Amino acid sequence: MTIPTSSIEQVIPAQGAMAQPETGKPTKAKRQRFRFVANKKAATGLVILGIYVLLAIIGPWIAPYDPGARGNDLVQPPSTEHWMGTTHLGQDVFSQLLTGTRSVMFVGFFAGIVATVLSVLIGVTAGYVGGKTDEALSAISNVFLVIPALPLIIIITSTLESAEDWLIALVIGLTSWSWNARVLRAQTLSLRRRDFVEAARATGERTWRVIVFELLPNLTAVIASGFVGTVIFAVLSEITLAFIGVTSATTWNWGTILFWAQGQQALAQSAWWWFVPAGLAIAILGTSLSLINFGIDEFVSPRLRSAGKTKLKTADGKTVRMRIGFTPVLNNSAAPHTHATPTPVVPTPVAPTPVVPAPADPQQKEVAP
Amino acid sequence: MKYFLQRLAFYLFTAWAAVTLNFFIPRMIPGDPVQSLVTKYQGQLSSQAIEALYVLFGLDKDANIWQEYVAYWKQLFSGDLGLSFTFFPTPVSEIISSSLPWTLLLVGITTVISFFLGTGLGILAGWRRGSWTDGLLPVTTFLSSVPYFWLGIIAIYLLTGPDSFFPSSGGFDSGLVPAWDQYFIPSAIQHSLLPALTILISSVSGWILSMRNMMVTVASEDYITVAHAKGLTDRRVAMSYAARNALLPNVSGFALSLGFIVGGTLLVEIVFSYPGVGFQLFQALGASDYPLMQGIFLIITISVLVANLLADIAYLLLDPRTRKEG
């Protein structure tokens, strides 16, 4: 995730799918609740994420070996005994991978929660309160946005005496909230002037109540996508820190595996089984989280959905491409339609002329005569 | 102009914040960090290095924190970042100035290529939605989730070897001396190809995704329909109407991604033992060389700020609305 995979910023949730009036029977409302899961991308992402969470919980118990235990098979390729081969000390790579999942998931989620709470506090306050508070808070989040996060995290963690998981997660969370805060502020600004918020304020609701019960429910999608994005960033950061040896090498996570593989010349020995599984595990976790984010994006802004097949073959073998709000011209005549030709006036006998001319529909213009 | 001055003021403020952060971080370490370092090295540190450490951590005199802060600024303005004690007594500024050009060239060139390539592909993917370009999306999603350094490891594993064109580490052939001559430059280029390719592959996907999403959003705007209705060519509508507007958030999103790309580049340098700032930082980390680490952090931050300023100028040229007075 070099760039926030979310483009929610540009879309106001209340104008998207969520704003549809709650008409119809209660059964319909019940079905709508699960619409997010019905999105294929989101469902795939959630299933993969579920597997990772499960492994984070049971991983250390189902690991066939102690991840630190030395064995006699040094740097062996995968076999039935060691599914992912062994390290320079005869440790089982598969067990290391399973045991390491817990630390990775813990840091990812803990940092995600810290950053999300901070971004909601700062972003929503800045957007809702406005004035000098807004200026000060925006300046702070812009500063954090521009300072390169990874070097900052490296500098801070390297000065810590004992870099334990929760401490690293805290540092990552405290340094990576700014983007979400900015997005939330923009959203809050646009929601603040809506009628329902004004009405709540006019009836004398307290500020915190307006924020918690009127604004936050409408910001759910933005908050969720920010949380997922931060989890991806936190996971990558933690693994990076472990890889360059900043964190303690005694707790296992995927970065530690890569740290040892790099340090013990796994490349020179062509021991691919040592570093490939850990990297793939990161990539698949990252992909699943990105998929969830795409799901949220498409849920909020249906335009972004993949359009399916948009090319059509016409009868005379020409290819026409469909586009949103735009009907292709099926040109059957030889002459181009660039010049207006006088149309013979045909009196319409049935329909009375409307008093107000109907507004021009852009789609109608393009339909071939 | 007013917009430009505002941005300039903001970057100066950020630079001040970064320096202040850099000043306070070592002072927040509990206990006596110097003593713990001395015990860690068990007499390997010279007395001069210990003295330099005490100055850095502000433990040498009973001056109050404000006086230290002023002294720190005075030091910075004279270009003095302290002495590195891995390479004692070389000044930190000297080490950094020898490694910075490597990083600047590597990051600069790859970022520019990646931005234009990614934006171009994003325009295509967003405009021709539903064609083969939709197949790019899952691939780019996967690639953007891969850590930079792991991709580097894989590249070394697959593409380098005893008789491969690509060297697996270093910035130039070991027999050469850095100079602007016909032996050194080709060797430097040859060594930078693989790291550059790694950064390019991991960073391009982010640009593709964000540009594609902006193109899709812009493509349903009314002015696009009008442009089509006017009978303009598809290409003209795509480039001058849709892409020009979709580009703006991508340019302003430069700030966030640049910091991330720089962070990733540091890691790629470590994997390839490339003689840039990242590899230097790695060595400093291994030796707990705090003066070098902090100097590197400061230089990276200031470089990113300058790059952001350049991106702002580009934005100014692209979006006439920011040029309007008032």
Image (cartoon, coloured by chain):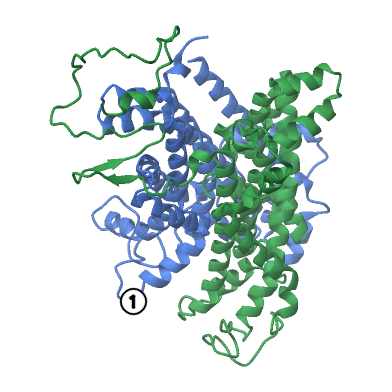
**Image height check: is A1 above or below A332?**
below
Q: Nearer the viewer, residue A304 or A288?
A: A304
Report the number of discs. 1
Q: Chain of mark 1?
A: B
Q: Quadrant of the C terminus of chain A?
A: top left
Secondary structure at badge 1 equals loop
The extreme bottom residue here reads A72
Indicate the amino acid at tag 1: Pro
x, y (%) of residue B282? 57, 59
The extreme left residue here reads A334
Which tint is chain A? green
- The blue chain is B
**Image height check: is A28 above or below A362?**
below
Displayed quadrant of residue A252: bottom right
Sort mark 1 into few (<14), some (14-19) or many (20+) by Cα contacts within 10 Å: few
x, y (%) of residue A7? 54, 39
Horizontal side of A311 relative to B41 (left or right) equals: left
| Residue B54 shows up from this direction | no
The extreme top residue here reads A355
Residue that appears at 20% across and 14% down? A344
Q: Nearer the viewer, residue A364 or B119?
A: A364
Q: Which residue is mark 1?
A: B162
Q: Nearer the viewer, residue B257 or A157?
A: B257
| Residue A275 shows up from this direction | yes
